[in-house]
Amino acid sequence: MIKRVNFTGRRRLPRRCVEATVFEGLPRRFSATINLADYNFPSDAEVVLEATSAGSNVVERIPCGAAGSVKQPTNRALTEAEGENIFFTLKVIDRQQTLGRLLGLAEHIRPELAGAPVSGGRRGILPIEPANLKQELWRLEFKDQDVVLKVNKDVPGLKDRARSDPLFYAVVYPEVVRRVLAHCIDSGVEITEDEERWEVLWLRFGRDLHPIKESPPSQADPELDQEEWIEDVVEAFCENHQFKAKFQAHLLGSDEDQR
Amino acid sequence: MIVRQFRESGIAEFRGFLAQCRTNPSTPPPLSLLEDDAHTEVLRPPMVVAPQQFPTKADAASYLAQVLAPLPDHEVALNAGLWTWLSLYYFDEVCRLKQGKRAVTNDYSYVFEPKVSYHYYRHLLFIAWRVLKVAPHHNRLFLGGAVSSLEKFTSEVLKRLYLTRIPCMFEVLDRIYWDEQRGKARAGVVSPETIKPGDLIHRFPIRIRQLERTYDLHSLTADQLIELLGDEFRFEQRRAKSPRKPASGRDTAA
């Protein structure tokens, strides 16, 4: 695991510093509330939001004034950022130095309306994207900044079903949770409170679901321990959502509809 | 010819041809597909392409940028049917005929897969157009080669979005890695097996990842970023400092 050393005093800001909402349309618009009150940044430090999306080269920079007088972007058009799943980065930059040292940084801020809320999580930690999967129905794609559930674009409505259909949920999501957690443990991230990587969000999600709120094992722990923790989480996930019962009820409902 | 885009069925037909051509390298490209309404549709607004020879990727990039100018870039960048159709139209350029045979490489060199993060930047025509769009200047490292192949240097940079999102990146790369004498990238900077100081594959991405945790790289000039990168990336300076090896390979002190 790569240990990062922070010599510069840069503060990692939690994503809750920014609450952003994206409104679909032409052009796409967004509003954001940036809250830096808890941080003692110099009042003249520059505040910038950057909007981009997975797979895009384009970064749209939105100046938001200074730390002492933040200009909250309200119903602002996103004219450059392209792609479906927009996410933001918040930078607080020291402008007293020529090279623009970062004083604060919050990354991968996912706005409301972009990305699907995963079952049991308040924040959307599993974006869903239609993709060309030939005869495959779904697939997980692990990226630097996200894990994405790809669903076959040729099946009409599958993206919506992936968000709401109890059958899809019951059949697909336990395996999704299992694979994602295994990937997160394998990536070697630590479940520290100030870390905001997607892997950490998932591990916290797992810990909160675990029957005794046990923290996830580390990459160095025996594989059996890792598997046991993951299985405990998946079992709790299924239990919380009563997948079997809902699945049976759904099937029964379908049978009755056909009579 | 009016520019078209393949439907799914057209892409499948084209993939079929690629597979056949691998087995039988003298198989002629199915040019009748290009205007087959069952497998293609005309793009709106109408645009026209003509047969061209592209000595370099730069030639392909500037020609295609001109042809596709009526379409918004973000639509062009996601249009699998268009780029795959263009690959067939310019098949003699992207897969040259040598002694009556073609060496067809992987499908992704010709069939554009914009949503597959490890394939999209390998499409030969798309990547030339894309480089010109994201780097109108300082792009000779990427656009100097033949359109029928993808240089390692290009794929190593273009697959890392966090590099190409930095505005001064292409100027920085040009100033660090362009070798005036060779007329292309410095030797040994894209060797996957060996890690060398200042190389593109191993050292450069790590150094950028370190710097982006400390500085707002988006607001830096090329001079500033090169300064931050450090001595490891100053090849000329390193060459001037390094002592010459004696011809015999032994210490020649008297």
Image (tube, coloured by chain):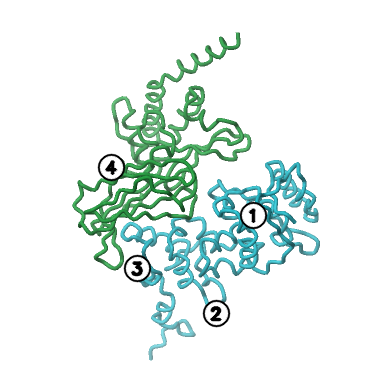
Chain colours: A green, B cyan
Q: Nearer the viewer, residue A96 or B119?
A: A96
The kind of secondary structure element at disc 4 is: loop
Q: How crowded is the residue under tag 4: few (<14 C-alpha within 10 Å), some, or many (20+)?
A: few
The kind of secondary structure element at disc 3 is: helix
Do the dots labelled 1 and 3 sit on one chain? yes
Give the labeled residue for mark 3: B228
Check whether the beta carbons of the residues at disc 2 and disc 1 lie within 8 A of each other.
Answer: no
Give the labeled residue for mark 4: A192
The chain identifier of the residue carrying mark 2 reads B
Residue A42 falls in which quadrant of the image? bottom left
**Left or right for B80, reference B226:** right
Q: Residue at x 57, y 52 (%)?
A: B77
Q: In the rendered image, is residue B102 in sight?
A: yes
Camera-nearest label, 1 or 4: 1
Which kind of residue does numbered mark 4 sit on? Thr
Give the labeled residue for mark 2: B181
